[in-house]
């Protein structure tokens, strides 16, 4: 059974959103029967990446396709700025975004400002989500864990606050918010992220 879902990584600039999408794609290319899984060569549609993920649930076999758009982490400002902001890019592609099934709230464990801005990004995506959208609170740069400034205890507490905020923003929301930390450099926990993406897409589409 096929299931396609839209994945939107949001977060400040420099947290690793773009390299995360590339690493996910490279890990997919390493999987057995890659082209058989997607039945075509991977291509880009606009700026989207397509990441295939095989999944089995209760004896059912799914071919999950994660469609990923990586918007910039630059916030819109009144002053003249270089490059496009998140809002400008989303406005350009809004027609192509039917609904967001999985939101990756990306921060760097080395950058406290990226962590403090998570609530900002939750509100920014609020007009793109639906009642079953799944969230993943995703820390990057796990390969530099000894230098971390965002501690795990704060992350666990933030998850509880985020769940409250998400229900305030969308009272009918019935999704979940998972926690994970990864390294784009070493690939640590990327397999687990792929699993969470597949499961999130299937839950958002109410396949499971």
Image: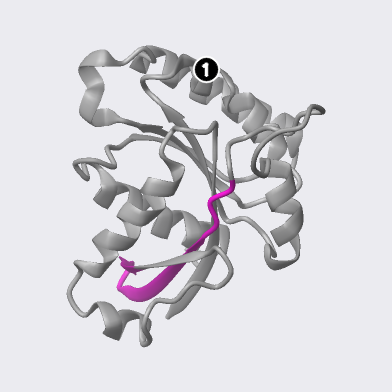
Relative height, residue 34 to residue 77 (above, below) = below
Displayed quadrant of residue 59 = bottom left
User: Colour mode?
Assistant: one colour
What is the quadrant of the N terminus in the image? bottom left
Tell me the residue at 51%/71% (across/down). 4
Residue 70 counted in the magenta span? yes
Relative height, residue 40 to residue 186 (above, below) = below
Q: Is residue 174 left or right of residue 95?
A: left
Tell me the residue at 33%/62% (across/down). 25
Q: Is residue 130 visible?
A: no
Displayed quadrant of residue 37 = bottom left
Question: Which residues are the magenta region?
Answer: 53-71
Tell me the residue at 50%/25% (across/down). 159
Q: Main secondary structure of the magenta part?
A: strand
The one of 14 and 165 positioned closer to us in this rendering: 14
Q: Is residue 117 visible?
A: yes
**Image spot of residue 203 (x, y percent):** 51, 58
Determine which residue is flagged by label 1. 113
The one of 22 and 151 positioned closer to us in this rendering: 22
**Image spot of residue 51 (x, y percent):** 39, 65
Residue 21 counted in the magenta span? no
**Image spot of residue 140 (x, y percent):** 35, 33
The one of 57 and 190 positioned closer to us in this rendering: 190
């Amino acid at each position: 059974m096929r299931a396609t879902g839209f994945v939107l990584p949001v977060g400040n600039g420099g947290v690793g959103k773009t390299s995360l999408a590339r690493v996910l794609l490279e890990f997919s290319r390493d999987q057995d029967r890659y082209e058989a899984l997607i039945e075509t060569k991977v291509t880009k549609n606009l700026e989207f990446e397509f990441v295939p993920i095989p999944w089995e649930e209760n004896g059912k076999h799914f071919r999950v396709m994660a469609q990923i758009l990586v918007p910039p982490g630059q916030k819109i400002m009144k002053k003249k700025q270089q490059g496009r902001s998140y809002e400008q890019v989303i406005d350009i592609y809004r027609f192509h975004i039917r609904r967001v099934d999985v939101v990756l709230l990306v921060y760097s464990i080395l950058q406290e400002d990226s962590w403090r801005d998570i609530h900002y990004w939750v509100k920014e995506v609020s007009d793109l989500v639906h009642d079953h959208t799944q969230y993943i609170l995703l820390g990057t740069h796990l390969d530099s864990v000894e230098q971390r400034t965002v501690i795990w205890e704060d992350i666990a507490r933030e998850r509880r606050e985020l769940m409250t905020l998400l229900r305030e923003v969308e009272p009918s929301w019935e999704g979940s918010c998972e926690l994970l930390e990864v390294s784009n450099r070493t690939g640590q926990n990327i397999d687990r992220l792929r699993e969470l993406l597949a499961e999130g897409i299937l839950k958002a589409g109410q396949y499971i």
